[in-house]
Image (tube, coloured by chain):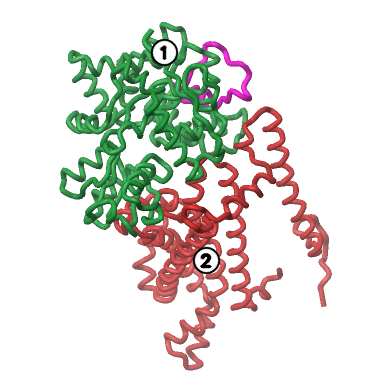
Amino acid sequence: MTICNPRHRLLASALVAVGAVSASCSGKQPDREAPAGGSAVAAKPAEAPPRAPGREYQIAWSVWTGWMPFKLMEVKGFLARRAAERGIQVKLVEFPVYMDAVTAFAAGKLDGCALTAMEALQPAAAGIDTVAIVVNDTSSGGDGVLVRGIADLRGLKGKEILLSELSVSHYLLVRGLDSVGMKESDVKIKNTDGDEAGKAFVADSRVEAVTTWNPHLFQATEGGKGKVIFSSKEIPGEIIDVLVVNNTALKQAPVLGTVLAEAWYDAMRAIEDPATREDSIAVMAAGAHASVDEFKKMMGGTDLMTDRARATAFLEADTTRATMERIKKFSIDHGLVKDTHFAIGYGAKATEKLRFDASYAAAK
Amino acid sequence: MTEEPRFRSIIGSPLAPATRLLLGTIGVAVCLAAYEFYVFQHQRDGGNPRFSPGLGQLWTAFGELTLVDARTQTVPFWTDTRASLWILAEGLGLGIAISALLGVAMGVLSTVHAMLTPVVSAIAKIPPTAMIALFMVVFGVTGDAFKVALIAFGISPTLTLGISLVAREVPKNTIVKAYSLGATTPSVVVKAILPQIIPQVIQMIRLAVGPAWIYLIAAEYINASQGIGHGIVLSQRMVRIDHILVYVIWLAILGTAIDFGFHWLSRLVAPWAAARKDD
């Protein structure tokens, strides 16, 4: 950590640098890039002198169905081409643990990050000027409450349920419990990473309830090991994945937003175009360590926003604003956001710490 | 009558209790001042105060953590502390029971010693955190059994070897004397060997508490509904560095208290051991 980050010893870096450095120094990148990547991640706008125009911008993402197009952007060179057109350097950093990426972004150590709209509130609440420029997907059955020996949501009363606390899984469960008039205190939540919870459910018949995502959901249901009693299909458009960029980086390189959006929609076109669709899916499946068939099933639970007009409209739509108010309330109720007056802005002119701005993604 | 030292040197020269206390206090004060200075510098350079909470902010954070949570109607800080201490006690208890049994058997009986030494020494080389995934599968993720097992597994091998070592070092003539006074083999173990090794065993347990905390916090990080490790994870998710630091300072205080407790226990059960040293 100190090797990669000699300039300042933020206390947060103790938590964050482990994630940032392990990602940038992991086997995914060529060795020669590891130290350079580490120090660029560690540099912090507030303390660093104005950076040379040629610096590399770091965008984090982690494995999730709706984010696999980032792999496509990288493998097919969409991002490299778009960045070269505009004369900037952008690097995608794959984080093995999603939450580490969020924490690193919240500590100002990344220029951009793929995260859920809910997690976007935390960096903003921590003082990072956060702009959501592209909506990646919304979950549509891809997240769910998976049980065995329990009939419905009411049957969860008094049960231990494994999920990643304070994440969208937690939000989904609370929405489900709300729908049948139950309270969170009616169940016993046990904090476990969603992937681990899914695997534990499949492997261990003692586990009665988990909130997790695909492929665990369809693996368990197809194997006859459990059933999904509530899923994101019942709250469409509420679990939103977005690409956010630190506004400090956008100020330094205004084209960064355009480059990322254009490269993203290059990937969307590759997925939609029948000529390149199968190849694109194969690349994404390989990146997600899934078979092509499995990945297609995972895509079934994900509403990938391939249509550019629809996606840009969604980013600032009234329904999205209503959803964000609901998510904000959840975040304030659970202490994720302390400021009860926290506000979310919409449009290019908004000045709030968190804003949804479709202007970068709008077709030019 | 106190004996005058034959020569005086700066190396290991004794200090008056008051001087020791004063120097200890200065050490703590310098540490706190250095931290405050770092915070001051970081914030002066325009750093985000969220990542460099001052001592005042830590005190406020402690206040926040000890408030009653509206959702659960409990004080998370105390429920976390209770949960962690309970599992720690269970894990230590189980680990000590296993080690005492095996250690004494290995120390007393050469056959058991010969049979178990290779196995126990090999197991002692496994970093217990490497076993978390396996323990979660074997003991399940639904309760806290895997955490108790992890602590017990983590501390037992070293403790067993340590106990067997001190049990073997009990002077032969002590044992011969006990036999010649008509003691049976079991009573030689219970009345001659055990009392001799108790203070050293307590010292070893005292040293095992540190590793036990590591295994507990690691396990709570990945699977828990409460506990100090769980509290730290949630604080991280909320980007509350001040809350994390409060938990960390609390761990230091708890660790020191437990350490002191064992020290006190050692004095209580074997006052002669402390007197034997020239401390």
Which residue is rendered at x = 34% and y = 22% of the image?
A70
| Disc 2 to disc 1: CB gap under 8 Å | no
Q: Identify the subunit bearing mark 2.
A: B
From the top left corner, tell me how far across and down residue B120 is, in percent: 38, 62
Which amino acid lies under the numbered mark 1 shown in the image of this protein?
Val
Q: Is residue A56 magenta?
A: yes
Q: Name the element at disc 2.
A: helix
Which range of residues does the magenta coloring cover?
Answer: A32-58
Judging by the rendered image, the residue that carries numbered circle 1 is: A259
Taking depth in this image into account, of A190 and B130 the one nearest to the observer is A190
CA neighbours of label 1 inside 10 A, class few (<14), some (14 to 19), many (20+): many
From the top left corner, tell me how far across and down residue A147 is, in percent: 25, 51
Q: Is residue B137 in view?
A: yes
Q: Where on the picture, by quarter, is residue A359?
A: top left
Tell me the tag on residue B205.
Answer: 2
Quadrant in which the N terminus of chain A appears: top right
From the top left corner, tell me how far across and down residue A266 is, in percent: 31, 14
From the top left corner, tell me how far across and down residue A349 is, in percent: 52, 17
Taking depth in this image into account, of A166 and A216 the one nearest to the observer is A166
Which residue is rendered at x = 51% and y = 13% of the image?
A253
Which amino acid lies under the numbered mark 2 shown in the image of this protein?
Ile
Taking depth in this image into account, of B173 and A115 the one nearest to the observer is A115
Q: Which chain is red?
A: B
Q: Where on the picture, by quarter, is residue A330?
A: top left
Q: Identify the subunit bearing mark 1.
A: A
Q: Colour in which chain A is shown? A: green
Relative vertical location of residue A34 with respect to residue A226 in this rendering, above or below: above
Relative vertical location of residue A97 with respect to residue A78 in this rendering, above or below: below
